[in-house]
Amino acid sequence: MTGPMSDKPDFLRTAVEPFRVEPGADARSVLERMERISFQGRNLAAAHRLWQRMLRDRLTIFLGIAGALTAGGLRLAIAYLIEHRYVDCLVSTGANLYHDLHEIRGRHHYVGRPKVDDAMLQRERIDRVYDTFAREDEFADNDRWIAGFAASLEPRAYTTREFLYELGRRLDSETGQDGILTAAARASVPIYCPAIADSSIGMGLSQARHLDPGAGHIDVIGDIIESANVVSRSAGTASIVLGGGTPKNFINQASVQAEFFDARVDGHRYALQIVTDAPHFGGASGSTLEEAQSWGKLAPDAARVSVCADATLALPLLASALATSVPDPRTQRDVPEFRICGSRLTLDGSPVPGNRYLASE
Amino acid sequence: MTGPMSDKPDFLRTAVEPFRVEPGADARSVLERMERISFQGRNLAAAHRLWQRMLRDRLTIFLGIAGALTAGGLRLAIAYLIEHRYVDCLVSTGANLYHDLHEIRGRHHYVGRPKVDDAMLQRERIDRVYDTFAREDEFADNDRWIAGFAASLEPRAYTTREFLYELGRRLDSETGQDGILTAAARASVPIYCPAIADSSIGMGLSQARHLDPGAGHIDVIGDIIESANVVSRSAGTASIVLGGGTPKNFINQASVQAEFFDARVDGHRYALQIVTDAPHFGGASGSTLEEAQSWGKLAPDAARVSVCADATLALPLLASALATSVPDPRTQRDVPEFRICGSRLTLDGSPVPGNRYLASE
Amino acid sequence: MTGPMSDKPDFLRTAVEPFRVEPGADARSVLERMERISFQGRNLAAAHRLWQRMLRDRLTIFLGIAGALTAGGLRLAIAYLIEHRYVDCLVSTGANLYHDLHEIRGRHHYVGRPKVDDAMLQRERIDRVYDTFAREDEFADNDRWIAGFAASLEPRAYTTREFLYELGRRLDSETGQDGILTAAARASVPIYCPAIADSSIGMGLSQARHLDPGAGHIDVIGDIIESANVVSRSAGTASIVLGGGTPKNFINQASVQAEFFDARVDGHRYALQIVTDAPHFGGASGSTLEEAQSWGKLAPDAARVSVCADATLALPLLASALATSVPDPRTQRDVPEFRICGSRLTLDGSPVPGNRYLASE
Amino acid sequence: MTGPMSDKPDFLRTAVEPFRVEPGADARSVLERMERISFQGRNLAAAHRLWQRMLRDRLTIFLGIAGALTAGGLRLAIAYLIEHRYVDCLVSTGANLYHDLHEIRGRHHYVGRPKVDDAMLQRERIDRVYDTFAREDEFADNDRWIAGFAASLEPRAYTTREFLYELGRRLDSETGQDGILTAAARASVPIYCPAIADSSIGMGLSQARHLDPGAGHIDVIGDIIESANVVSRSAGTASIVLGGGTPKNFINQASVQAEFFDARVDGHRYALQIVTDAPHFGGASGSTLEEAQSWGKLAPDAARVSVCADATLALPLLASALATSVPDPRTQRDVPEFRICGSRLTLDGSPVPGNRYLASE
């Protein structure tokens, strides 16, 4: 039995090291022993490594969330990432924020099943998200609550960032409950929601106009400008995306748009995505991080990892490992500090304009 | 050799009939011979049948388009469906409209390949969408053109429906070229774009504010109200979705929201989707039409077909067959007639409010 | 409105040409107008072009079929490809041949549905393949028939190629029905079934030993040798794969094994696959044709096309177009001529050994 | 802020409980906190629970492995499951055993990357499996070694179970290294490989005939009979499948075939699969466990869990958790005891015939 023949220099440097099962191993140890296996297991381990590197660099870290992650039980994991500043700025679909609000308000989603008589569910007024159920009357009550909240604000146009901050503060003061919206409000982490019109939050906002025609006005174009200015005012940026969708593109767009007005911006320095879509159908959710490079969304030498997996399976392991590797980034990182005062946002003390593009000095 | 034993009544009524190859067969004949095979082939054939049924009923037919369908070569097929009124109302991602505008303005996308050095593309300022290339400088020129166009409008907030109609008219008068935007403007087919902030059209709008701080204001919440009122003013509705994404949910949301204010609305009567996502990750794009029923998005007895396929493969065959089965629906259907006059929309002569929900009389 | 700016030489040569809908268009015309669109639609059009090129070259064309294609209604399309010699040698899963035998014997598969109470189906003795049903008692009858047939053969070990040829001949003489097995027997097209032990044909063979302990002996290793010798005796080879699985690898393995013993063999010259699996999980079905090149399965300059689609959707369009483009290859190609006489196979008059590797002279 | 309204009895019993991140949590604790989230995360947690139940019941537990799991770094995890008797009988593709042999013989697979010039790899004689590399000359050496080993055996037909046991014993005595083949040989855990002809082990066997025409004869039909008799001699059976493919169907087929001859057999009592394929294309790998029920492959009341994930991502977490929950099943379970003596297999002392079906007494 001979050992391996002489290595070929470029391609055969690092041997696959089979994963060894160890009873009692913690999440970090499991993930670290996956670093030299193959396929998506290796990619998840590489994601852990990459996120650690991001936390050591001076960066504004964007997190995008799409898919039914909060109805599906990841809302407190995401709130944890916000609270402890594993991330600095959130971009979300409306649905993820809506289902977070639902639980912050004391309601629940329920463990259901995918194979069920949906006509019966409809009669019972139960809404289904794959294997998860919720009560339609509670959703209608949320919509009315959102309408009332929106109508209680000064009647003018709000960016989603401003509106969602006010929403988070109100939820926090009314309930004191943990969640994405409340964690972000407490930590002054901005939230952008580019497709708010395609969600129940948008529906609630539209109902606000019944209460007051001047209510429920949202300035989504202002979000574009402000988010690009966040990029140009940051020492560097990173993109972490769970699930693709509008958040993925919006985070990349902020970088492209910033570069347009500020030559020093050069694309995100790090990119990490956990998606289930494949690239070969041409959709944005499944597009590769290499493709993002062709657009200048990522820096030419950006470090990047893509994991093809359901986030409900990948994030619990990844976040548990990361919480062990880097216990509380707030105390260890050079955390970018946002302050939110109505329509005005500042980053590390300097204003981030929402009405026009201004290169940072 | 005996024939089949006596049939079991409920499950074994219709035998699979193997597809027979016939040289020279037209698209309709191919698709009709796929009706009694299995899997996604059968589903595409059923989609053809279902669309024909929609065209015989009195309906407002929504078409949602997501994914890079127009960069990918389907823009004139979609324009054909609009022009001949196989569909009545469009809901689109911003990207699909942007890439349509790009070609209407006389530019091109290019046949590329997925395996390429993206860093080199970036240096060459070529943007990649999977296997398709485009020139970044032409995109930047589009953005400026959109900014200029937006700044030329009266400075006030526009729903995407109003803005996109004006955009289509301007493109038509400037170029006379065929495309989705121009076909919709000519036919007064409304277009909604709920996630316009997540697209290059949104970027162009944001740049308009440099030219005029009062320009580039978009009222996406108004779109929610108006689209729901379109549903409640329609004799019935159908949903056709290519690719999922925000258009899929927005079309369903319009029905749910309409029902909230008008008890006679009861969900879409027909639903047809061609998507590549699987349902088991919980995302909206892959969600089944049965799941949509639990939410009341579809009528309890809605006819529905879901096809799991890339639209670039499925639509050419489906649209070619449909154009043969139902040659020019404009002349055969009871076509719902929209008229667009600035912020006001009428359907079959009655106004469709965009500022509040009103049940139809 | 200006035209496109000056082209960049390498990447921007060929513009995407949007698909135009034409009523009455035949399959070939539909597919040819898909050649300059994007994504999987373009790939299917390229597959059509590639298959035409194969038919003009001097080649032995292998066809691999996996997945429930014959239960799913493609068996007569595949028989058409065999009969008219669009392909020359078949590699199949056992299930595809078994379900073909089922219909050749006058039984049926039935149009079912995927969402059904499977416990009830089990009580009714109905077997389900996704949306397709069949009767369990008819399957049990097939198994007995196969056992009886196998026991009627001279008791010795048979390669699957020899056994399946005898099976096809028996079915043809008993029924005269069209099918894959009968078309292949009539045209002396060899069929290999490397995983015959994982199928109901294997179960039937195992039951033959109850009738005669010397019956039901299959020499799958002989198939490996013979198929590699087919490659080394061919002027050149091509691989067409529907669905991946064991046929995909077996066809590639034949080429690798042939090269081992015959330096003139240099991998398949053409490769075409229509699969639904993605490459990023590391499985063989989803592996790319580029990966196959690293193994020497394909010639370094092999022409290749991969389509990500369900074959029930893609093959009807592709085969219809091909039957129009190249009406009857038997009369136009330099068809490799197999003769089968028991365990002996000849190709163009020279023997193809099944017991040892022999380079062709 | 009100609490949830009164529950609806049937559907809303168990609330989703969001996953909470805990630094230092071990794999078991992570997985247990995923039990009340949604989608594939919940399914993996349910798989953990189900496997624990299997280990408490009196069962023969089959494990099927397909896809490049051993090249991809899971071989020692699978060996661990065999050694500690989390499973009792293995069904594998040939490739998984071949890549295990490769490392047992002291060679390696290497950490590679998917985006690489495959033509260059071919020139360098490096074979690629997605993101993993290996040396072609070492593979050729393995093939010769297998040929030599096969030629050293008494010249007669071997079932794969007998051949693979002898192979494992030889590897163990020559190398003493851990691996799947050696762990199974040491523990007398039978291995079946129904598609051995579609693998490099098959290629090695075919080369054995050059050394001795009587060598390299494999009786895959005998495997069918013996595996069915294992089922009928077991107190009950369970099926665990990683990756689908021929092992998935072979394990189910054993149950169906056993039932045919022994009315007391009633399908597997437990079924657990971790696959990446979706059901809607009709292929066997993606088929649901419900579909398996219609065929009688599973008991009508079988407990079952299906996880849609890459095994390289799911198994490390699952096996680590299981090793913590049930530390060493050998000492806790009523382990079914196999003994292998040449072509004869016994289970708990009674013979398992390989040449005919015999109901257990």
Image: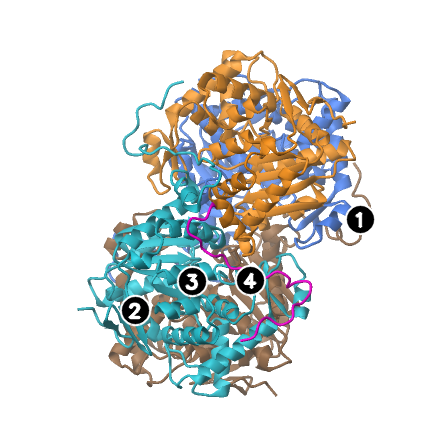
Chain colours: A brown, B cyan, C orange, D blue
Q: Which residues are magenta?
A: C1-26
On-image quarter of the C terminus of chain C: top right
Using the rendered view, name the quadrant where residue B111 is placed: bottom right
Give x and y (percent) for residue A73: 42, 60
Q: How many marks?
A: 4
- Callout 4: helix, strand or loop? strand
Which residue is nearer to you in this view: D301 or B141?
Answer: B141
Which mark is on residue A273? Answer: 4
Q: Which residue is mark 2?
A: B338
Q: Are marks 1 and 4 in contact (CB under 8 Å)?
A: no
The residue under label 3 is which amino acid type?
Ala
Image: A197 above or below D133: below
Rounded to the nearest angstrom, the CA distance separating label 2 from label 3 is 17 Å
Q: Is residue A249 magenta?
A: no
Q: Chain of mark 3?
A: B
Whichever of labels 2 and 3 marks the residue nearer the N terminus, that label is 3
Asked if residue B281 lies left or right of residue B189, the reply is right
- From this viewpoint, is residue A68 visible? no
